[in-house]
Image: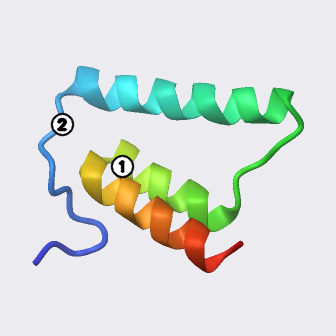
Amino acid sequence: MASATQNVIKLTVEEAAARRRALDSTVGSLLIEGMELESGEREILERHARGEIDLPTMRAQMDAYIEAHP
């Protein structure tokens, strides 16, 4: 079982950079619109950007977070 700090997805440098740019762009777009992610949402996205979780896991965790925090 992977720990919270262990990458489960082997990312190339390029993929890690692309994920970071996508996350930063998303956060910036939200801020421009006057919205902000909750810390729990941001952490889930950060874990995906670091390669700790894959896309289906990220989606499932976001869905669960949103369901638990209406």
Amino acid at dot 2 = Leu
Q: Quadrant of residue 2?
A: bottom left
Residue 6: horizontal and vertical position, in percent? 21, 64
Percent of width and height locating residue 67: 57, 73
Residue neighbourhood size for the residue with mark 2, other residues' Cα within 10 Å, grouped as few (<14), some (14–19), many (≥20):
some
In the rendered view, does 37 fall on the left or right side of 42?
right
Q: CA distance from mark 1 to mark 2?
A: 11 Å
Q: Residue 11: x and y, percent?
A: 18, 36
Q: Give the residue at x 41% y 65%.
A: 61
The residue that mark 2 highlights is 11
Which residue is identified by label 1? Answer: 48
Q: Position of residue 18 (x, y in %)?
A: 37, 23
Color theme of the render = rainbow
The first of marks 1 and 2 along the sequence is 2
Please say if 61 is above or below 9: below
Q: Which structural element holds mark 1?
A: helix
Task: Identify the residue shown where x is 75% and y is 35%.
Answer: 30
Q: Is residue 53 visible?
A: no
- Tell me: residue 58, above or below residue 67: above
Q: Residue placed at 47% from the left, 50% from the top? A: 45
- Classify residue 70 by image quadrant: bottom right
* Image quadrant assignment for residue 40: bottom right
